[in-house]
Structure formats: C-alpha cells, structure tokens
Image (tube, helix red, strand yellow):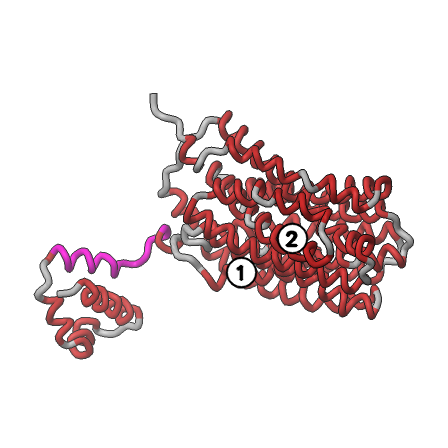
C-alpha cells in the first residue's frame, strides 16, 4: 500500500472523529479499496500512521505557520507606519505653516523617535514575563490620540506632543507585534519577520503619497480622516490579541521542549554590539533620505513639494520590497550573508547618489532602498537566535535602537543642513554604509558560538 493512502485514511479518520461519526464504518463505505489496503498494512506502518491521528501537542500547534495572523499583523503594521509616516511627509507643509527651520524639523523627528525607542525595551522586558495580548490595541489607541492632536495642533509645542503620542504608540506596537510574528512563524522566523516588516515599509511608502495628494491640498485638519485607519487597526489588533491569548500556553510549551545552545556572555555582548553598529549605519543613512530627501530634491532639482513626495514614495516602495526579500533569503542562505550584502553592498550606490542627475538619482535610490532594507529582518532574527528566551527584550531593544538612531540622525543632520546645506549632508552620509565592514566579525550563525563542553 502506498504511503499516501495511509495518510489519506488517517486524515479522514481524524475528521470523522472530530464530527462524531463512526470512523470504521464511514471509512469502509467511502474509501473502499483504500480502507481494505489499510487492513493489510504491516502493523508498524499502521501504528506510525495512527500516531499521526493523535491530538496535536502544544509544540505541534506552535510549529504551524499561521499565515492569516501574519497577514493581519502585516496589515496593522502598514496602517501603523502609514500614520507615522504622515508626520515626516508633512514636514514641508508644517515648515511653512509654523515657520520652522531644519533644526526644529529635526527636533520633531527626535521627539517621535526617542519616545518610540526608550519605551520599547521596557515593554519587551515586561511582556517577556507577563504577556499582554491586548496591549497591541491599546498602543494603537495612543497612536490615534497623537494623530487627532496632530490634525489640530496650534503651535510647535503641540506638534511635539503629538509626535510623542505617536511614538509612544509605536513603543507598544513593535515589540509585541514582533513577538506575535515569531509565535505565528512555524519556525520560518525570517519569513515571518519579513512579512511583518513589509507591511510597515509599505505603510511608510504610502504615507507620503497620501500626504501629497490628500493632506497638502486640504490642509492640516484633513489629517483627522486617517483616524479611520487607526480604528480599523484597533479592530484587527483586538482579533490578533484574542489569538495571541489562546496561543500563549502552546508557545510556552513548545519553548519548554526545546534545548538552546549555551552562549558565553562575552560573545553575546560582542555580537550584539556589532549588530548595534550595523543598525546605526543603516538607520542613520535612512534618516537622511526619509526626513530630508524631499528637501534635497526641491533644492537641487527645483521640484515642487508634490513631485518630491512622489520620488520619496518610489524610494520607500523599494524599501518595502527589499524588506520582504531579506528574511526568506536569510532563512535559506544564512543571515550573516544578508546582513553583509545589504549594508556594505549599498556603498557604491550611495557614493554615486550626490553626483547623479534627477533620472539617475531616482534609479539609485530604488537600488539603495532594495538593498539596504533587507538587513533589518535578518539582524532582528539573528539577535533573537542569540537570546531565544528573551524575544521581547531583543525585539524592543532593536526596534527602539533603530528608532533612536533614526531620530538622532534626523536631528544631527538637520542641524548640519542648516550650517553646510542639504547637498553637502548627502555627500557626507554617502560614506556611512562603509561601517558594514563590521559584519565581517559576525559568526556564520549563532550556533557557531556554542560553548563546547569541557
């Protein structure tokens, strides 16, 4: 008897038992020859197949890839980051309305990034020990409050408060969402993180486009319409929270059945420091594009604000595509190679960018977005494999550090642009990806750091 026949009968047996039917009679009637073959199957083979009919253990439940949850999570990430990207996309309008200089623009970004970064590790530390399934929806509620305040902010201090509220919502959303993505991964950790990340990057790309064609023509008050997106995300995150709550026992049981390599504290610290340096390189450079790319295009090529926003959308769209590719490639060939190629590999293109005309500037930013965006999923999963029992701390710490580097980068580069000009800033930032050389010191996988028994 073919093995597939055994598995067909076993699958049918499980389904009939689940619905309260008489499995022996039903199989004989509906399977005919296949069922008779089962009766002639050698005892060991039948026992092996029958064991598959047993109820799933918690570890088996946790081992399935829950694609519907991952897709909902990615959608919520899209909505969350779309709302956040409105802030930076509206900088030209806010600069005019409130008579801001580049230093104040950088301070808005710094406020958002600092509130988003400082709280994330604390959220991760707490939820590692005390899971909070519905904290995702609560965090989105905080983002909703910041969005509504942004739409009616009458002064620069109120803009800062709105940025802080949006950043606080992110500090809750990102570490817990990353944990849920890993829970739903079924072992395909890179793929799950990439699906999660691509939603955020797609949202970051859509935000400037919506700002250009919807908000700018209608004014600051039209930002309030995006509350609909925040409310939709709250509904989806409530559903995800219910799934999260159901899966926590199975996830804990699956973790309890696994044995993790014991790594020396020194090697963990050194590796995490290297990953931090690479995050600095990536996000400091991305801050120059996400915060000031529109100003660069308007200054160097005399584009209008709307045309510059379209170019920003093209760049951020390339970032979204690159983020989707990094995780699965890392699952297949190793995360070190993805990290190495995505940061150092972008260097030739960043060096060319300040000297290109408008057409080649567009092409180069697409290539830069595709390459550099593939790094974060690989870096995050790599770090999670270093400390597999501290998913919340690692996720919160790395998301927080990435946000912080983006905020500090925006503030520093804004100050620098006020003194030397925006074009000179891009010439300096072009060398940042050279820091990717530090990826040479990463082991091929965290397993290479296993401490051998004496």
Q: Identify the element where label 2 is drawn.
A: helix
Q: Is residue 48 magenta?
A: yes
Please state which of residues 168 and 138 is positioned toward the viewer in this rendering: 168
Image quadrant occupied by the N terminus: bottom left
Residue 139 on image: x %, y % = 65, 54
Is residue 377 visible in the rendered image? The answer is yes
View extreme (top): residue: 454
Q: Position of residue 268 (x, y in %)?
A: 50, 30
Q: CA distance from mark 1 to mark 2?
A: 38 Å
Q: Is residue 210 magenta?
A: no
Query: What residue is rendered at 60% in x and 61% in y?
Result: 76
Looking at the rendering, the stretch of residues picked out in magenta corresponds to 44-59
Residue matched to label 1: 240
Which residue is found at the position 39% from the left and 27% from the top?
Answer: 451
- What residue did someone put label 2 on? 364
Relative placement, left or right, of 392 versus 42 is: right
Residue at horizontal 60%, vertical 45%? 346
196 up-or-down from 397: above or below: below
Which SS class for mark 1?
Answer: helix
Looking at marks 1 and 2 on the same chain, the residue that comes earlier in the sequence is marked by 1
């Amino acid at each position: 008897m073919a093995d597939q026949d055994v598995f067909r009968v076993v699958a049918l047996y499980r389904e009939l038992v689940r619905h309260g039917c008489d499995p022996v009679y039903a199989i004989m009637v509906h399977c005919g020859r296949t069922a008779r073959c089962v009766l002639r199957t050698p005892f060991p083979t039948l026992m092996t197949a029958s064991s598959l009919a047993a109820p799933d253990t918690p570890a088996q439940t946790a081992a399935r890839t829950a694609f519907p949850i991952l897709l909902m999570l990615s959608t919520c990430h899209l909505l969350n980051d779309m709302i956040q990207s409105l802030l930076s996309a509206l900088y030209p309008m806010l600069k005019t309305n409130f008579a801001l200089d580049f230093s104040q623009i950088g301070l808005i970004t710094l406020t958002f990034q600092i509130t988003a970064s400082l709280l994330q590790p604390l959220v991760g530390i707490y939820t590692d020990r005390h899971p909070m399934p519905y904290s995702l929806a609560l965090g989105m509620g905080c983002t909703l409050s910041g969005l509504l305040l942004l739409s009616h902010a009458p002064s620069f201090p109120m803009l800062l408060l709105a940025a802080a509220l949006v950043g606080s919502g992110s500090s809750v959303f990102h570490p817990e969402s990353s944990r849920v993505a890993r829970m739903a991964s079924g072992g395909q950790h890179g793929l799950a993180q990439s699906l999660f990340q691509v939603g955020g990057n797609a949202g970051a790309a859509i935000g400037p486009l919506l700002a250009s064609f919807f908000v700018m023509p209608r004014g600051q008050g039209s930002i309030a319409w995006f509350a609909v997106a925040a409310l939709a995300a709250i509904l989806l995150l409530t559903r995800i929270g219910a799934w999260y709550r159901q899966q926590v026992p199975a996830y804990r049981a699956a973790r309890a059945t696994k044995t993790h390599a014991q790594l020396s504290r020194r090697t963990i610290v050194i590796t995490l420091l290297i990953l931090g340096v690479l995050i600095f390189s990536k996000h400091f450079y991305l801050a120059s594009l996400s915060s000031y790319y529109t100003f660069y295009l308007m200054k160097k090529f005399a584009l209008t604000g709307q045309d510059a926003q379209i170019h920003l959308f093209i760049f951020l769209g390339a970032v979204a595509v690159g983020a989707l590719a990094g995780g699965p490639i890392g699952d297949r060939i190793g995360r070190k190679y993805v990290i190495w190629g995505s940061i150092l590999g972008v260097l030739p293109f960043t060096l060319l960018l300040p000297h290109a005309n408008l057409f080649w500037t567009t092409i180069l930013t697409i290539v830069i977005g595709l390459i550099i965006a593939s790094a974060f999923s690989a870096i995050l999963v790599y770090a999670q494999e270093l400390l597999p029992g501290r998913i919340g701390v690692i996720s919160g710490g790395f998301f927080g550090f990435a946000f912080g580097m983006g905020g500090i980068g925006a503030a520093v580069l804004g100050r620098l642009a006020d003194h030397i000009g925006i074009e000179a800033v891009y010439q300096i930032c072009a060398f940042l990806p050279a820091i990717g050389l530090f990826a040479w010191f990463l082991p091929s996988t965290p397993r290479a750091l296993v401490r051998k028994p004496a």
